[in-house]
Amino acid sequence: MEVPSLQGLGIEHGLLTKERHAKVSEKHRSLRIGIPNEISNDECRVALAPSGVSTLVSNGHQVFVGAGAGELAHFTDKEYSDVGAEIAPSAADLYSGCELIVKVGPPRDDEMKLLQEKQMLISALHLGGTSPAFLQRLMDLGITGIGFEFIQDSDGTLPIVRMMHEIMGVMSVQIAARYLESAEGGKGVMLGGISGVPPSNVVILGAGVVGEWAARTALGFGAHVIVLDNELGALRAMEHYLDRGITTAMATDQYIRHAVSTADVVIGAMMTAGYRSPVIVTEDMVAGMSEGSVIVDAVIDQGGCIETSHLTTHANPVFKKYGVIHYCISNMPSNAARTATWALTNVLVPYLIKIGDMGSINEALWTDVGLRNGTYVYRRHLTKKSLATMFGMPHRDIELLLASGI
């Protein structure tokens, strides 16, 4: 069993999306939803677990899953077909037969050729790798594009981002602990130390969700944890949540330089939703770190916040610069593919049901603030100001487009 039972409920019954037949509204229409294979060599997740497919089918939708799409997350084609999914033999069949595509990573070049006019696309966008050409292609096709990074509910939470960032925060410390070991070329120290030997210094840049869960995990290892951020309120909140078990400081050049120079581990977690991560650790700061220290730039998919970082892959996860080990993988949750897939399922399924219940994507966007906030291209227009600013492109406000009926 992968997770201990909770009050007699096993994982399959206690933690997965619960199936139920929802009351069908007058507007409801059946959607053809496609869950394609993730063609990136580094992506092991799939957008929906079989439990989520079961819920969608029971709500009257048709779900098509690419053959083998769930294998790397240990979900078999039989599990999907048993709950009512149709297994698509090829990507071309899946894309051509579905009006709504739900996937983890943004479409790659081969997939861009398969997208259909006026399709709906829900996926991550990965701001660090997004280009004007990619956005323009989606606009030319009249795609309605909804990005994981932008889906924001009325209370300000980013549900998909939060789920993935919790995983990233935990994993970043687990990874750092491994690469500190001598066999991995690290300093040969433990995060928590032992009796008579002091713990390692873990410096976390950013007091958001990634930073919080990295701090929780590092404290669990017994490390000495320093968290830096440029918002005093965020630091105060983290001290409160973690019972002042951490040291906090404002992310000024002086404090960053001092903390990094004494760090055994630096976790890059500084980001602002919808924008590129700010670079706050300079190359000369990295050069001043001791040999065998570890940097995990957990927000490299948003561009990274450490100047010496560049994208790495699961096949070649690290590189050394100035003797410092750098781990800069953009899709860290892929290494916890099964957990991450369940997390995505829990968040995505209610949105998909909402689109079907509203009868059209227009009505769903109008009535659901999370989906509306998540939309970055709609009716051949770029609708995210942050993307427009990043690439020098014009944009239109999504609410004005919906109201005007364009």
Image: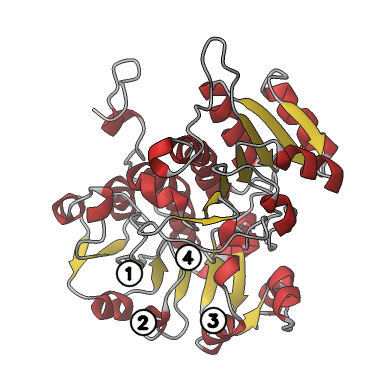
**Residue that mark 4 sits on:** 122
Front position among marks 4 and 2: 2
Q: Is residue 393 visible?
A: yes
231 shown above or below 92: above
Q: CA distance from mark 3 to mark 1?
A: 17 Å
The numbered dot on residue 110 is: 2
Mark 3 residue element = helix
| Residue 45: % across, % down | 35, 54
For the N terminus, give its image quadrant.
top left
Q: Quadrant of residue 71?
A: bottom left
* Precedes in sequence: disc 4 or disc 2: 2
- Which amino acid lies under the numbered mark 4 shown in the image of this protein? Ile
For residue 399, say whether it is visible. no
Please give the label number shown on residue 340.
Answer: none
Question: Which is nearer the eye, 5 or 196?
Answer: 196
**Residue sitting at 72 percent across and 53 percent down?**
281
Q: Which residue is mark 3?
A: 134
What's the mark number on residue 39? 1
Q: Earlier in the sequence, mark 3 or mark 2?
A: 2
The amino acid sitting under disc 3 is Phe
Q: Secondary structure at mark 4?
A: strand
